Amino acid sequence: MPYAPEHDEVPNPLRPGLRAETPPDPCAMVVFGASGDLAHRKLLPALYNLALGAHLPAAFGIAGVSKSPFTHQEYADGMREAVGKFSRTKPVDPEVWRDFGAGLRYVAGPFDEDDTFRRLAAQLEEVDRTRATRGNRLFYFATPPSTFPTLLKKLHEHRLIRPRNDSRFTRVVIEKPFGRDLASARALNRLVLEVMDEKQVFRIDHYLGKETVQNLLVFRFGNTIFEPIWNRQYVDQVQITAAEELGVESRGRYYEEAGILRDMIQNHVLQLVCLTAMEAPVAFDADAVRDEKIKVLRALCPIDTPEAVAQRVVLGQYTAGQIGGADVPGYQVEKAVAKGSRTPTFVAVKLGINSWRWDGVPFYLRSGKRLPKRTTEIAIQFRRIPHSLFGEGASAPNVLVIRVQPEEGIALRFSAKVPGERYRPRTVSMDFRYGTAFAGAPPEAYERLLLDALKGDQTLFTRKDEVEAAWKLVGGILGVTESPESPPPFSYEAGTWGPREGDALIASDGRAWRRP
Ligand code: BG6
């Protein structure tokens, strides 16, 4: 079904879902971790879709770098296959691929060897010559975090990172997790800023590329009727759920190091908290938006003592169970997971925000793997009516549910009179669905973010102080939960909504989790 553009949009005939705009400046992009999962599943399909929509610069080339020994052609063939499999638009358009594929290069070599970077530099010069990319560079670190310092050092030593004021731009996109605690995030930030300027750094959090997440800003600050009630006077509690059916799949090695707090809370979920709780920015630009988000992070009540953790945090780990009727194994027997592992795959947190707007309003966060369904939502639950005219307990509180995924949309639940003689209220829902209001699939998060990085727009990327403030909270929790004296996570059966203790956390406040 075609995307129905709003009246003031310039539709792009080639590509539904994104506006036709001036393409970014010519650029050669370098993907470190070129043979990895992220490059296959997300980056190359996103770049191909940008090419399909004529959003890429007219002069563009990609150099993939990783250890595996491929020729240029073998790499291009592998990427053609990956795009065929993972692209949101199918089948691959042979004409678009011809030019896109012709711009793909590959450099094989370890990241700690100078020779790799000498060959990369030569390759980039060749791309500049043959693809007219004019010396502009976008480096993408799609690699494990342990490689980030080496990559930065080598790029710097080989003069591949040019100063910000050079006429040719250099930008670096760094994947999450950015550090593994506050100290390492600070150290990494120091290293990054030794070799480039903050304006050249793009710390990526793909949740910010999701249409529904960006819409939070429009919903809150593009309407008059929600802001006056978006505060402690009207809101009783906020619940944010990021649930997945998937387990750790083939990522056991990474996940053992990360766990749910580093994998989901420090970045994606706290970003949702920021966008839900922030004040209106003075302008819609990168620094103004990020200035407001950082205020939320700074106002979070710290959770860094055993007492605070006991009152506000519940960790869980899945055991064998059933998802969608199929048996699934427990975390402890997943590939590359240590026997007796204490890595949490579920967390429930009760957050407090010390601000005039939110004082006393709990933000309950919940995220986990192997939960009954994949769903991410933000539920704003309003206070109960002060006095019911229609019988005790007859009126449930209003709830505004922002469905980030799937079935993207926004629903407002309110009481309505059941037809008939008596005044019997029942909760009904007013529902906005993206799929119906704007026909056609929205672009993938990575498409939007790659395009922004190519254009140099940092609004949807996290700033140095933001990343550190998020680690301050999460590092405080980890400092307690990862100490040897701390108890192991509670068990929960795969296919359930986490351990019972997660329910008790919120029940002790006289509340209950929503069932999304
Ligand atoms: C990633 C995490 O950042 O986000 C994964 O590393 C998680 O563990 C994923 O599955 C969830 O993203 P999405 O877009 O599927 O909600």
Image (tube, rainbow, N blue to C red):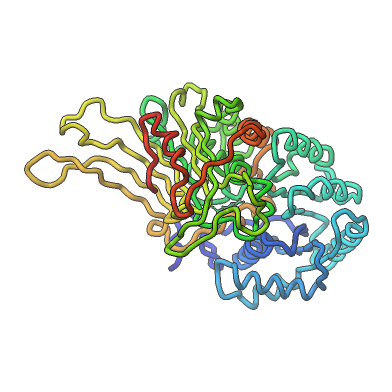
Asked if residue 7 can be seen in this view, the reply is: no
- Please identify the quadrant where the N terminus is shown: bottom left
Q: Residue at point 85% right, 47% down?
A: 162
Q: Is residue 360 above or below residue 425?
A: above
Which residue is outermost to the bottom? 94
Percent position (x, y) of residue 495?
45, 54
Q: Nearer the viewer, residue 423 or 341?
A: 341
Percent position (x, y) of residue 404?
47, 49
Which residue is outermost to the left? 421
Q: Residue at point 68% right, 55% down?
A: 24
Quadrant of residue 507 within the rendered picture: top left
Q: Nearer the viewer, residue 399 or 436?
A: 399
Q: Residue at point 67% right, 51% down?
A: 338
Percent position (x, y) of residue 83?
63, 70
Which residue is outermost to the front? 340
- Name the side, left or right, on which 445 lies relative to 438: right
- Name the side, left or right, on which 244 lies relative to 510: right
Q: Is residue 231 above or below residue 53?
A: above
Quadrant of residue 15 within the rendered picture: bottom right
Which residue is outermost to the top? 356
- Name the side, left or right, on which 475 lies relative to 73: left
Quadrant of residue 296 within the rendered picture: top right
Asked if residue 198 can be seen in this view, the reply is: yes
Percent position (x, y) of residue 406?
45, 55
Q: Residue at point 72% right, 48% down?
A: 174
Q: How many marks?
A: 0
